[in-house]
Image (tube, coloured by chain):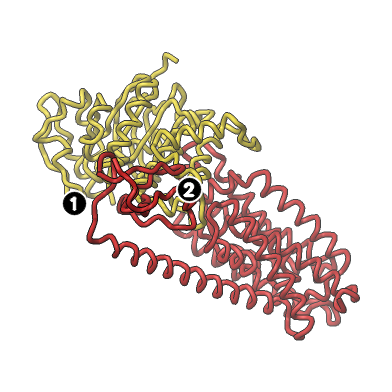
Chain colours: A yellow, B red
Amino acid sequence: MTDPAIRLAGATIGYGDVAIVRDADLSVRRGEAVAVLGSNGSGKTTLSRGLLGLATVLGGTVEVLGAPVGRLRERGRVGYVPQRHTVSGAMPATVREVVGVGRLPRLGLFGRPGARDRAAVAEAVHAVGLADRLDDPVAALSGGQQRRVLVARALAAEPELLVMDEPTAGVDAASQAALAGVLARVAAAGTTLLVVTHETGPLAGVLTRAVVVDSGRLTYDGPLAGVGAATGPDCHHPEEAARPPVRGYRLDQPRPAPDAVRLRDGSR
Amino acid sequence: MELLEYGFMQRALLAALMVGLVAPAVGVFLVQRRLSLLGDGLGHVALTGVGVGVLTSSAPVGTALVAAVLGAVLIELVRARGRTSGDVALAVLFYGGIAGGVVLLSLAPRGQATNLDAYLFGAITTTTAADVAVFAVISVVVLAVVWLLGRRLYAVSDDEEYARAVGLPVLPLNVVLAALVASTVVLSMRVVGLLLISALMILPSAVAQLVGRSFRSTLYLACGVGVVVSVAGTAGSYYTGTPSGGTIVLLAIALFLVVTAGVALRDATARRRHGRLAEVHAAHPHEHGEGCGHRPVPHGDHVDYDHDGHLHAPHHTVTGTHYDEHSGSAHPTAVVPPVGRERP
């Protein structure tokens, strides 16, 4: 358990042979709660997807829970909340069924859920404040509630590392507050959190460390409170996503090389 | 029952029963995955298998099964490569399948069982006892796999990216599903024909989807609908002298339309009734809560509020919670305090 939860060394991550995140170094200890900040298109989602085996590691090292990503056994140790507003599926499904999927990686190939698994599902749904909706179809829930169902699905796995992509985007204030409470309890229990986000506001009390990604480079790594107000991603409105990121960096960090900027604008 | 006196009808109804049960059990996963037409494509591929079987004088059911399963695995591998040409590759496979089948069948010596129509549109009355035995084996295997792996197939069909992120074996599960579809295609070949196979997988799922609340209940309901339309269509075709495949599919579509209309009517009625109740209280739009001046009446999982002798119950909607008239049937009237009782 002395391995860091996440270790990136000179990591280049992308899709196909297109590099999106370049030469990233990062070490996250067990139990840390880290925000990955940056405007849309900065590469912060790609960074998180690299940890999950959903993006390709093109160079360098990416280790999760002590094992190279892709060779990690028992992926059930990693929880994932995708960047999506609603539960997908064309067929009806109850909250219990969707959250139950979170237990599957722990059941092996043919295992069937037992009492322990059912309890974990009920616990996770209770944690996100939807205990009274356990047997309701997810389609009957609001967008914010559906997002909480996806959080519960990740929690049901009882993960050691929880990766969340934009969990507060487009979610009403009540659901954001509920989510902050859940994450505070999860973090207090020792789970490592990595939250990709535009805005740290709703989760400021939970997340302690921040990493800023801009044009595929890590441009800041330090206390969340230290992210400069004038240059931090908080001042990026989501609608600025399509535009190039605002220039200007903390003085203690090197400016990104010009080729990194070109990479972002010219590679697609 | 007159139609049960004939051996060929007994075999036909048995085949219809198995197809009606199995096709939707696989189809729900295809609908969930938004790959409704995969069955259709594999039906095309199976025709080449039929052609090979007829030419080599081996059982067309066996060769069709081999061709369809190979095609299914190939499709999944192409999809997993994620190349933009995947769409074109599928089209090549599908049309190649049907073209190969037509050409191979035309090469068969005259007098052979080369009736193309029978394979394309079904010829349930030609089902032999050997066919029924093969169908039974396929049915048991398919249902057993769905029972064993259903949860994983649901997970992968529902959210493939999440399944991959948490380490479920996505590609093997997709290949298993495709192989199940291929087996079902061959099973359905005699009953509804290769061109209508998708209908028996998709339409019962579409009907069940309208009324189901959970995935599990939707799956069971789809199988129930499949059995009913399949057996009823086959029996009906005996009396009307129409092809079984077309009859079954038209019956399923009719059921789909009726249920769609029924659900729309139910929703409209519920909305209208809700609207009327909302109007009554529009003049009084406050949210009930502690200390709102109305007496709280705990009721199971929620708290009602006594509002001048009738109860207001919380109603959770997309936009939040508001209070409506408590529906009378859901609440024992004995709990409702009479008007004018003392209130705190």
The answer as to whether the residues below labels 2 and 1 share one chain is no
Q: Is residue B105 above or below residue A174?
A: below
- Locate residue B49 relative to residue B99 in the image: left or right: right
Q: Amino acid at mark 2?
A: Asp
Is residue B272 visible to us here?
yes
Q: What is the x, y in percent for residue A149? A: 42, 42
Q: Chain of mark 2?
A: B
Residue A131: quadrant of the picture: top left
| Label 1 element class | helix
Instruction: Characterize the local packing of mark 2: few (<14), some (14-19) or many (20 or more) Cα atoms within 10 angstroms.
Output: some
Residue drawn at 57 percent across, 40 percent down: B169
**In which quadrant of the rendered view does residue B94 lie?**
bottom right
**Mark 1 — residue?**
A239
Vertical relation: B5 (above or below) A191: below
Label 2 sits on residue? B159
How far apart, in angstroms, are the residues tagged by discs 2 and 1?
27 Å
The foreground one among B253 and A73 is B253
Residue B181 left/right relative to B156:
right
